[in-house]
Image (cartoon, rainbow, N blue to C red):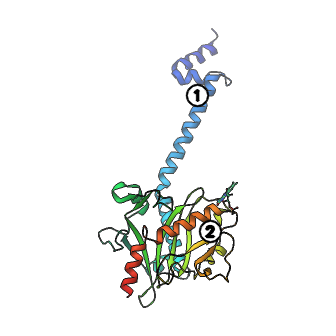
């Protein structure tokens, strides 16, 4: 055997499996499969490491985003004040949805309604009749946000809502004036509806239509709903109606149902009753 071949043969033997593999021709199936697996493995490690490393940052960003939405629905969207200062005008409380009473034992910073809704110990399963919002289970407790004015008086109440549209669960907030019937603003901060159709829930023009609408009639009964097409201002019920989304009746129905769910007996009904009573 020539000296060069002998040397490469020795190197191959010394390199073991890897050496033998690398000395194979580039078009060898074994070498191609091996290299493909190695590239996939390296990429998977890089992606997994990035996902783990960024998880905390993502969680913080999500929290900041939810806070921004709360500030917006509270009418505290003036950027001249820091987010912290504006959030200091909001009192966060936890409500027992069954009784409508505030709960002091739970920590507002760590309580997570979404996590609680998945835990059978902290939630109730809804029957088909009850579950008009398509949420399956409802947490026993919910966070509410009381917005205070300069003289420390509560001037708006913000309630979290969620429910199924066409493709996804929509998560949002509704803020109410002190009469607990007039809508100040609504916002959806998370959903997977189709942009341009159900995704128009994010359209500021559509959201503006909600301002000043009434939820409850003069007898205190829930009377609000979204209508197909546009609300006729001449209609006696116009104050209780909001335009449906064009070409997105299924998302519209979902939105209508989720508000009905959260603002009546199964949701914040007992809490709203308590607030009304305390106002005298
Ligand atoms: C690709 C695709 C995406 C759609 N996305 C939505 C949606 O996000 N929300 C919705 O209500 N309807 C959506 N629709 C339309 C519904 O299937 C249905 O036709 C519509 O809700 C009926 O509303 P209309 O009676 O106002 O036309 C989508 C349809 C298609 C083909």
Residue 91 image offset from top left, x and y in percent:
40, 78
Q: Quadrant of the N terminus?
A: top right
Crowding around mark 2 (Cα neighbors within 10 Å: few <14, some 14 to 19, many 20+) is some
* Residue underneath mark 1: 34
In the image, residue 251 above or below residue 68 = above
Quadrant hosting residue 164: bottom right
Quadrant hosting residue 18: top right
Q: Residue furthest left?
A: 105
> Which marked residue is nearer to the observer: mark 1 or mark 2?
2
* Residue underneath mark 2: 202
Q: CA distance from mark 1 to mark 2?
A: 48 Å
Figure quadrant, ligand 1: bottom right
Residue 6 image offset from top left, x and y in percent:
60, 13
- Of labels 1 and 2, earlier in sequence is 1
Quadrant hosting residue 139: bottom left
Crowding around mark 1 (Cα neighbors within 10 Å: few <14, some 14 to 19, many 20+) is some
Residue 82 shows in the view: no
User: Which of these two is toward me, 112 or 207?
Assistant: 207
In the image, residue 104 above or below residue 179 = above
SS of the residue under disc 2: helix
In the picture provided, is 171 more to the left or to the right than 29? left
SS of the residue under disc 1: helix
Q: Is mark 1 within 8 Å of ligand 1?
A: no
User: Which of these two is toward me, 173 or 21?
Assistant: 173
Residue beneath the point at 59% across and 64% down: 253
């Amino acid at each position: 055997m020539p000296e060069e071949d002998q040397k490469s043969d020795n190197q191959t033997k010394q390199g073991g499996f890897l050496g033998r593999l690398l000395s194979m021709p580039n078009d060898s199936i074994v070498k191609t499969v091996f290299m493909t697996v190695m590239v996939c493995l390296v990429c998977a490690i890089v992606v997994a490491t990035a996902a783990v490393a960024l998880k905390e940052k993502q969680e913080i960003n999500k929290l900041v985003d939810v806070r921004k939405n709360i500030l917006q629905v509270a009418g505290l969207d003036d950027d001249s004040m820091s987010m912290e200062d504006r959030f200091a005008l909001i009192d966060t409380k936890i409500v027992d949805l069954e009784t409508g009473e505030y709960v002091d034992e739970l920590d507002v910073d760590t309580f997570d309604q979404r996590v609680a809704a998945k835990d059978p110990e902290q939630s109730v399963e809804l029957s088909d009749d009850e579950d008009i919002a398509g949420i399956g289970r409802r947490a026993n407790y919910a966070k509410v946000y009381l917005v205070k004015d300069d003289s420390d008086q509560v001037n708006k109440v913000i309630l979290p809502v969620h429910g199924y549209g066409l493709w996804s669960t929509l998560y949002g907030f509704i803020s109410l004036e002190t009469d607990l019937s007039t809508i100040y603003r609504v916002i959806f901060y998370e959903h997977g509806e189709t942009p341009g159709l159900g995704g128009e829930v994010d359209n500021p023009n559509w959201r503006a239509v909600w301002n000043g609408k009434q939820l409850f009639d003069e007898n205190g009964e829930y009377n609000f709903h979204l209508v197909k097409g546009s609300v006729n201002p001449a209609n006696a019920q116009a104050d209780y109606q909001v335009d449906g989304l064009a070409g997105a009746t299924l998302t519209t129905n979902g939105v209508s149902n989720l508000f009905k769910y959260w603002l009546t007996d199964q949701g914040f009904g007992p809490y709203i009753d308590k607030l009304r009573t305390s106002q005298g």
